[in-house]
Image (spheres, rainbow, N blue to C red):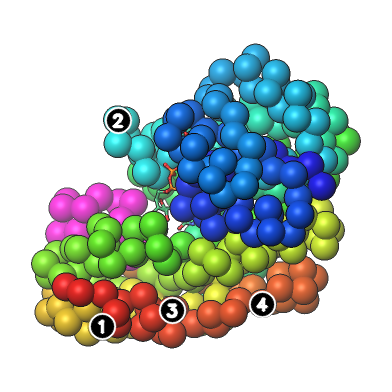
């Protein structure tokens, strides 16, 4: 099948592109950078250079490819020249609008969009599922991200003539993510700078990149339009997983930081993530996508990721 992927050079894209190529799909990947274009070609994809904010050029490149499937893996959390959160909000809003318009103009049949499982309302008990409302009454620091996710999902699911599939991935870990042993989170943990905020009640649903990419492969044809949580089987509170990670990294046990201090030092977004977010259930994806995680728990995934890593 002809597949166009926006974001093929990102953390999940680098895992997904080789899987698409190995299954015999003709893959065109979009990037803004000549270096990333070369890397994408080395994986067996065609590469096109375009910026998602250049709407006219985007329509041009996507209509030339005429893909049956468009995959949206764009975020800007790795941005170094601008505020990553603000850029990601723009990518998810304006960027999605442009990509949907280009997909429609090119006659694509299906759009598969990367979303996140961790901005559902934290009110209520137990895990969230795909019918749990997004956190649209979130505090000011969190709300713009939730609104951008809502807009991105609405555009994906409600465009005439296109089957929309939204994959709400959990927290990515694995090579090239923030949880990579060389990257920011393990670095902070090693320095004793990653505290448990309040009760550490924020419940994380993790997903290894490879399992996220495998679910995306299933969604190419095997998914009815709609939303699917792509998370592992063991949601865990910060208070549970952070000490395990510290031990695997041979780092000091995490300190505790009261919520009021954390609001001042880290801001409301991190307090939401570390002390309030709700975990998500993967029951629908297991039932309807025919997918299940190979790495069922972050416990085994973290062990594999950190045990061989040198400090
Ligand atoms: N669910 C999650 O936990 C989650 C989700 C997303 C990201 N993250 C984390 O955030 C960190 C950074 O993510 P990442 O490595 O995927 O990088 P990223 O900076 O978020 O970029 C992702 C992709 O979007 C593309 N992109 C961004 N802005 C674009 C624009 N204006 N026009 C065209 N393409 C654009 C990038 O392409 P080029 O740069 O090649 O142009 C890249 O392919 C990683 O640690 C990752 O794990 C986590």
Q: Is residue 296 magenta?
A: no
- Decide: few, some or many residues near mark 3? Use Cα within 10 Å; few <14, some 14-19, many ≥20: some
Which range of residues does the magenta coloring cover? Answer: 261-274
Distance from label 3 to label 4 (Cα)? 15 Å
Decide: is 170 above or below 43.
Answer: below
Q: Alpha carbon of mark 2 to alpha carbon of mark 1: how far?
A: 33 Å
Q: Quadrant of residue 282?
A: bottom right
Which residue lies under the disc numbered 2?
A: 81
Residue designated by label 4:
292
Residues at circles 2 and 1 in contact by the CB criterion of under 8 Å: no
Q: CA distance from mark 1 to mark 4?
A: 26 Å
Residue on which the image places disc 1:
248
The image quarter containing residue 199 is bottom left
Asked whether residue 174 appears in the rendered view, the answer is yes
Asked if labels 4 and 1 touch by Cβ distance under 8 angstroms, the answer is: no
**Pointer 3 or 4: first along the chain:** 4
Say left or right for 244 vs 188.
right
């Amino acid at each position: 099948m002809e597949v166009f992927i926006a974001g093929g050079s990102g953390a999940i894209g680098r895992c997904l592109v080789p899987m698409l190529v190995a299954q015999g799909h003709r893959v065109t990947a979009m990037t803004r950078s000549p270096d990333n274009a070369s890397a994408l070609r080395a994986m067996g994809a065609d590469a096109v250079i375009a910026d998602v904010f250049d709407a006219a050029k985007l329509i041009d490149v996507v209509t030339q490819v005429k893909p049956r499937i468009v995959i949206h893996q764009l975020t800007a959390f790795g941005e170094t020249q601008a505020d990553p959160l603000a850029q990601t909000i723009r990518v998810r809003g304006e960027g999605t609008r442009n990509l949907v318009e280009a997909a429609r103009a090119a006659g694509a049949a299906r759009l598969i969009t990367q979303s996140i499982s961790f901005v559902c309302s934290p009110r209520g008990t137990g895990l969230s599922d795909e019918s749990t409302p997004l956190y649209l009454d979130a505090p000011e620091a969190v709300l713009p991200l939730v609104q951008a996710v809502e807009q991105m999902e609405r555009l994906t699911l409600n465009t005439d003539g296109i089957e929309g599939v939204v994959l709400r991935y959990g927290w990515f870990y694995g090579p090239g993510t923030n949880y990579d042993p060389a990257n920011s989170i393990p670095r902070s943990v090693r320095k004793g700078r990653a505290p448990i905020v309040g009760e550490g009640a924020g419940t994380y649903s993790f997903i290894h990149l490879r399992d996220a990419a495998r679910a995306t492969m299933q969604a190419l044809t095997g998914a009815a339009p709609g939303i699917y949580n792509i998370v592992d089987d063991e949601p865990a509170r910060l208070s549970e997983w952070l000490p395990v990670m510290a031990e695997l990294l041979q780092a000091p046990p995490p300190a505790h930081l009261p919520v009021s201090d954390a609001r001042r030092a880290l801001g409301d977004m991190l307090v939401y993530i570390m002390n309030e977010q709700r975990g998500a259930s993967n029951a629908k994806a297991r039932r309807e996508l025919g997918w299940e995680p190979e790495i069922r728990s972050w416990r085994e995934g973290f062990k594999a990721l950190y045990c061989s890593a040198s400090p």
